Image (cartoon, rainbow, N blue to C red):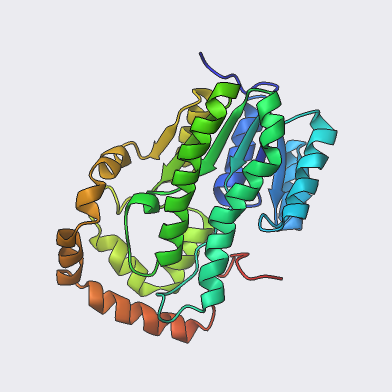
Amino acid sequence: MRYDLAGRVLLITGAARGIGAQLAREAVARGARVALVGLEGELLKQLSADLDAHWYECDVTDQASLDAAVASTVDRFGGIDVVVANAGIANLGTVAVAPVDALVRTVEVNLCGAIRTVSAALPHVTAARGHVLIVSSAAAFTAMPGMAAYCASKAGVEQFANVLRLETRPRGVTVGTAHPIWTDTDLVRDIRDDLASFRTALHRLPWPLSTVVPVEQCVEALLRGIERRKRKVYVPRSLALVQALRPVVLSGLSDALITRFGGQTIVGQMEDEVRQLGRSFGRTSVGERS
């Protein structure tokens, strides 16, 4: 049966930009009531005014802040039907040149932030026999130089959701993970603009891993996944085949092919570019602690 979003309450993290903001717009258009959670208060405030939504400025790595965001949402709407753990960042550079704090911060936001978000909202979602959607990535089952912490965190997100699904199913709560490829958001545009090495690597990746999808296409797939309470959402759908072939994608043969087609040259170029940039995250990223 279709899980109609009309009248449902959705709490979305990472809602100030990109996938989270567009998801909020489309959910409201379908009659949902939305709580916007994120770090950029001015952007959240403006989006909230446009959508007549609730908003709460919050760092997903701070449990007290998240608990307050959830409590504020429940005070406003009376409960939570769907939680979308979407907040995510990506540090720039390889493990050799990235500050360890930037690597750890990426994992804290992407993985620990998802765990904290779900834990804070789960009692209310359980009461509503609702749905949890955690935004993972194609990075959960692929590997690319310069994305060690990001890939690790997104693989962790998927496994967290896989176990959570088994735990919550007897209580009527469904759990899904979304696996988008490169989506045309500020996060991806920042990396593409900052690093010529990333542009080169993206061009050399095989289809569908070289695909950049519009944010509207990604959000449409996510909403369809929520409405059907799907366990996996792939954007594009061809990524399901990539995940099925994960043993090949992450094999020694794949490593050799990446090296043969300039992988080591790209790594060196990327490291030089990141050193010259002098920062660990993209221009619009909120990866750095305030």
Residue 1 percent coordinates (x, y): 51, 13
**Count of residue discs:** 0
Quarter of the picture containing the C terminus is: bottom right
Residue 57 percent coordinates (x, y): 76, 53
Left or right: residue 70 versus residue 269 is right
Q: Is residue 32 visible?
A: no
Residue 21 percent coordinates (x, y): 62, 45
In the current view of this chain or complex, which residue is farthest to the right?
75
Please report the residue visible at 73 percent of the width from the left and 37 percent of the height from the top.
Answer: 51
Quarter-wise, where is residue 170 in the image? Answer: top right
150 vs 30: above or below: below
As rendered, which of 198 and 142 lies closer to the eye?
A: 142
Left or right: residue 215 versus residue 75 is left
Residue 215 percent coordinates (x, y): 49, 45
Q: Is residue 243 visible?
A: yes
220 vs 275: above or below: above
Please report the residue visible at 65 percent of the width from the left and 46 percent of the height from the top.
Answer: 117
Left or right: residue 32 versus residue 133 is right
171 vs 72: above or below: above
Quarter-wise, where is residue 9 in the image? Answer: top right
As rendered, which of 147 and 188 lies closer to the eye?
A: 147
Quarter-wise, where is residue 128 in the image? Answer: top right
